Image (cartoon, helix red, strand yellow):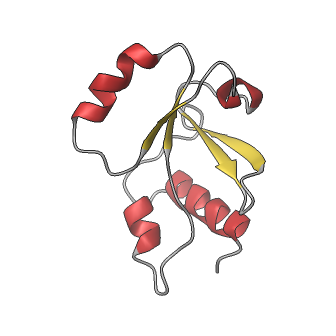
């Protein structure tokens, strides 16, 4: 989706990042070994963003332009597939709306 957003006329300010929950660091070598399209971040116990934002496996945490939490998109309930796909299109529209992009 990042490539799709970046390819739109005028580009995008939207950035998609992967975030791993604190305590699950042992999986980092596996997830980062393959070529990655998006940056991968590691939460810490002291920051605890994952828990504070209601993160769980297969969720997208959406932040606004000031990095303020807006909402969670549950990929288990609304899985993405190749575009065109209603869930893919809805998430893309939501991200653009939160970013103030047409």
Residue 84 appears in the figure: no
Rendered position, 53 above or below 102: above
Q: Residue furthest left?
A: 34
Residue at 77 percent of width and 51 percent of height: 68
Rendered position, 25 above or below 18: above
Q: Position of residue 55 (x, y in %)?
A: 65, 29
Q: Position of residue 58 (x, y in %)?
A: 52, 31
Q: Residue furthest bottom?
A: 9
Q: Who is closer to the viewer here, 68 or 75?
A: 68
Instruction: Please state, as top left, top right, bottom left or bottom right, where the C terminus lies in the image.
Output: bottom right
Total tally of numbered discs in the picture: 0
Q: Who is closer to the viewer here, 60 or 77?
A: 60
Q: Is residue 16 left or right of residue 56?
A: left
Residue at 53 percent of width and 74 percent of height: 12
Q: Is residue 96 left or right of residue 39?
A: right
- The quadrant holding residue 53 is top right
Residue at 69 percent of width and 40 percent of height: 72
Residue at 60 percent of width and 58 percent of height: 90
Q: Position of residue 74 (x, y in %)?
A: 62, 36
């Amino acid at each position: 989706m990042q490539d799709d957003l970046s390819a739109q006329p005028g580009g995008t300010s939207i950035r998609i990042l992967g975030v791993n929950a604190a305590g699950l660091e042992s999986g980092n070598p596996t997830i980062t070994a393959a070529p990655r399209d998006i940056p991968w971040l590691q939460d810490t116990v002291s920051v605890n963003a994952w828990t504070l934002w209601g993160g769980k496996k297969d969720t997208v945490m959406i932040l606004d332009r000031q990095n303020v939490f807006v909402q969670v998109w549950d990929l288990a309930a609304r899985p993405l597939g190749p575009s065109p796909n209603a869930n893919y299109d809805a998430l893309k529209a939501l991200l653009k709306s939160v970013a103030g992009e047409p």
